[in-house]
Image (tube, rainbow, N blue to C red):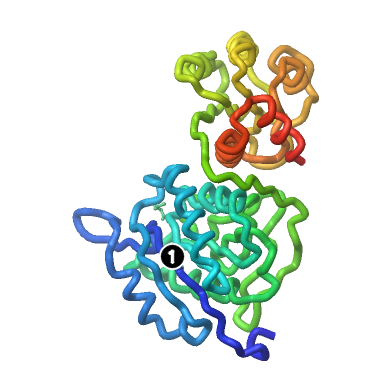
Amino acid sequence: MEKRLNMKKNILIILTGGTISMKASDPAGVIPSNEFADFLRQFPQLNSVANVEVMDYLNIPSPYMTPEMMFELAKLVDLKIIDYDGIVITHGTDTLEETAYLCDLVLTTRKPVIFTAAMRSGNEIGLDGPRNIIGSVRVACHPDSIDKGVLVVMNDEIHTARDVVKSDTGKIDSFISPGYGPVGIVDPDKIVYHRTSLYKDNVWTDQLDTKVELIKAAAGMDGKFIRCCMENDIKAIVIEAFGRGNLPKSLVPDIQAAIAKSILVVITSRTYTGRVLAEYGYEGGGKHLETLGCILASDMKGVKVRLKLMALFGKYHDVDIVKRFFKQSVL
Ligand code: ASP
């Protein structure tokens, strides 16, 4: 199919950094290198797949990425994609799922936008970067990639930005969509999509409000992080609770105080897969938290809920409106 169409598409590759643009050296360790853009411009296999242009936008480790930078990147994509058939973005793996998700929320384009990365740096044996780039450009060129939202291509698999997570610190098959699986694969002969995600969420905003924090539950914790949020004018607190969305009862007074101050408290789970649910009625259980006014965020992970709330507060400002939009948008 790909071969029969035989019309080369115009693809822009935007570089932001990460291991894919890094090299190992002694004694510095793995650090950013400036050679990756030139490497891509001369990468012969790429030009047989598409007409490719490379934009050397950033060269940072992705732990340096901020929500503001993610949003700037999304605005760049919005502008640039007018002139291309699709865009591939290279990124560090550490925060890739966050940048990809924020772009998925705020972008309006129907054209393919693909994030990719590498688990191995440029001079490691068996490096995955070039293969991931070729796979991503092929996916960006494929007609079935239109209208799928932002996708992540790693290790010959295609994932949605909503569901993908980095699951392993070092393996090349680190990127998975827990509980759901990839939406497609990149095979040598063709791109195959084998499922569609039924769930697509957008918050078309022209700004973020970053006063949203994320707290992870741990056995025996108290409410000091919640109190810290209250002292710092935070508008929403996302709590990665246990299991179905349960917390130690020692947190309840501070959660009540936060809600009384009109801070939105959103409950997600630190458990790998599954939805949070108003099931347990004991003090601190998900059902009890809901009666206190907490919002349960279904199967969404904490880091992504945090970004979504930043987008919603950026758009609507008012806590009650944000609450209503958030509630009606979760599964
Ligand atoms: N620390 C690196 C980064 O996220 C890891 C990677 O790119 O794979 O930039």
Q: Nearer the viewer, residue 233 or 252?
A: 233
Q: Tell me if 112 is positioned left or right of 116 in this view.
A: right
Q: Is residue 245 visible?
A: no
| Ligand 1 within 8 Å, label 1 CB | no
Q: Crowdedness of circle 1 by 10 Å Cα count: few (<14), some, many (20+)?
A: many
The residue shown at (56%, 56%) is 175
Q: Is residue 194 above or below residue 278?
A: below
Q: Nearer the viewer, residue 123 or 95?
A: 95
The residue shown at (44%, 73%) is 130
Q: Quadrant of residue 29?
A: bottom left
The image quadrant where one finds the N terminus is bottom right
Q: Amino acid at mark 1?
A: Ile
The residue shown at (38%, 75%) is 40
The residue shown at (48%, 63%) is 89
Secondary structure state at the residue bearing disc 1: strand
Q: Tell me if 64 is positioned left or right of 199 in this view.
A: left
Horizontal and vertical percent position of residue 94 = 45, 49
Q: Is residue 18 above or below residue 305?
A: below
Q: Which residue is mark 1?
A: 14
Horizontal and vertical percent position of residue 70 = 47, 49
The image quadrant where one finds the C terminus is top right
Q: Extreme left residue here? A: 27
Q: Nearer the viewer, residue 276 or 52?
A: 52
Horizontal and vertical percent position of residue 303 = 55, 39
Q: Is residue 25 visible?
A: yes
Horizontal and vertical percent position of residue 254 = 58, 11
